[in-house]
Amino acid sequence: MLNERFPILSGKGVTKIFGLGRQKTVAVDHVDFNFYAGEIISIVGESGSGKTTLAKMLLGLISHTEGDIFYHEKKRDISSQKKKQEYWKGIQAIFQDPFSSYNIFNKIDSVLLDCIYMRGGRGLPHAKKVELMTEACSFVNLKFEELTNKYPFELSGGQMQRLMIARIFLLKPKILLADEPTSMIDASSRATILDYLLKLRSETGMTTIFITHDIGLAYYVSDTVYIMERGKFVEHGSADEVILTPRNEYTKRLISDVPKIYEEWDLSTV
Amino acid sequence: MAKVMLEVRELTTKYITRFREDVYAVDHVSLKVEEGKSLGIAGESGCGKSTLALSLMGYYFPPLHYTSGEIIIDGHTISGMNADDVRRSILGKEIAYIPQAAMNALNPTQKIIHFIEDVIQAHNPKTTKKEIYELARERFELLGLPASVLQRYPVELSGGMKQRTVIAVSVILGPKVLIADEPSSALDVTSQKMVIKMLRDLMEKGIIKSMIFITHELPLLYNVTDDIMVMYAGQIVEKAGAHKAVFDPLHPYSKGLMGSIIVPEQGLRNVKLTAIPGVPPNLKKPPSGCRFAERCQYAKPECKAISIGMRDVGEGRTYRCIFTEQELREVYKNA
């Protein structure tokens, strides 16, 4: 791992506009960011603030209208399918809804095998593939023997989300983008999922980008926090700085709207 | 002592599946809610929180079936009543229920006022539309919702607004008990706060007399309710005042649950989250002993053998464990 801090993913004036003319919606409005390698970054905002649109642009699933995205300090080039596939070896995602993240016709074996193939493991002997898959499953406390020949819908939501992490474990991308990975599961499984994500990051040193509306979660996991309001970053800085001494009005409001347990929760401000 | 609004004694209900198997999702649950108080129910997915909410209404439809126990609302026993009588004279008037994802329940082709007309005319067929409109307008304004909402269609309202409208409609008859099942879980923090403020207002302005609030978000429960009850695998495992339940839980499961709280406050960044390993038991064949024993790190062989009763430690505090309060505090200290 490199010791010096360098931005693995950065953007300048990144903008996404949906529609034309009067119907125009500016979803992401000239945002600048520098995501440093090895850090955990959170992007926090309300519903409709443009978090997911930004995530899709970072993943290269949709194009950006204006601005530039830099990957490894070079301008990102995903103009052809081949280049895209190369880019996706470096960046992977976990989505909000584990139930719709899987192809329902593919068995779990093939979900995991695809990851091995993507890392160039097509020629490996079968026993070695099984060993890799077993290792990945045991990382998230699942048993491969119990999962083999099953379909994703036979698992619970928490198990599916853990299997997603097992995929990431096999793929070992440079950047992991997690879009609300815990919002569909309850509080006690949330701790488990976060534990695995943090463990994975400390083992592989990958950069993790959390997208969430839960400011408590952002505070708990991240090194750097970006606050997003209506398509713009209104505040960013280290987690302690942003959450404990917020300067922006919007950030202050977001923090005051979260129920607390040690401080008084002021209900009169709505 | 304040008047008891809702009392439940040893309520047991079950689901009967297509394969004729019984699933006991609510197993010998007893609780009491006094006038002006709110009770929170916490627990992980599948522990029976929502089934308990459904069972409390006394209106059962397959696959949910009533087995035994009593439900008493303000002195009247409603368990064992004819289902149609319950619907006509109890639901809405005595006890109201806000289901999960209630905001999606609004028929998109009807204006909001139409739902209110439906509710009121089902109970008092003689009320005129004008009277209903006046009542609805007054009630909406009291709760801080603009009266113009009444003439709108559900699609014209935002998520938070829809949720608040549903709550306002469901309490239009002024029920004695309101059961709110995850009323804010699909909303973002700002709308969530408005919903909570509204529920508080309902209590303060005397529109509802007592409330049962169900959620898995513990910081929210702590801020909304007076008492917290923790459910696990269909049973109550601990009941205590909100402060005690969050800061000083006794049962090992509650302890684990409270260890998963995340809030943006100073010093909580370095606290290690505790995850409870394993999965809850299958309720088709619940274990004979303590239901949590499989996942409990303090479990002894006896835990799995004998059935564990509730222990009362005074001050309205009860919990279900083989260990005494003293023993539990001892093991937590050494952990």
Image (cartoon, coloured by chain):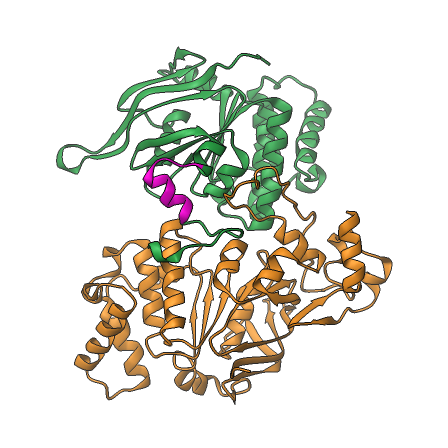
Residue lying at 71% horizontally and 23% vertically, measured from the top left: A128
Residue A127, located in which quarter of the rendered image?
A: top right
Residue placed furthest toward the left: A22
Q: Specify the quadrant of the image occupied by residue B112.
A: bottom left
Q: Which chain is orange?
A: B
* Residue A250 included in the magenta stretch of the image: yes
Left or right, B252 with respect to A64, comes to right
User: Measured from the top left, where is residue A131 in percent x and y?
Assistant: 72, 27
**Image coords of residue B19 (percent x, y):** 62, 66
**Residue B39 horizontal/vertical position (percent):** 53, 69
- Judge left or right: residue B310 versus residue B228: right
The quarter in which the C terminus of chain A is drawn is bottom left
The magenta region covers: A245-256
For residue A54, above or below residue B265: above
Residue drawn at point x = 39 percent, y = 85 percent:
B88
Q: Residue at x 67, y 18 (%)?
A: A124
Q: Is residue A153 left or right of residue A238?
A: right
Shade representing chain A:
green
Given residues A127 and B299, the one toward you in this image is B299
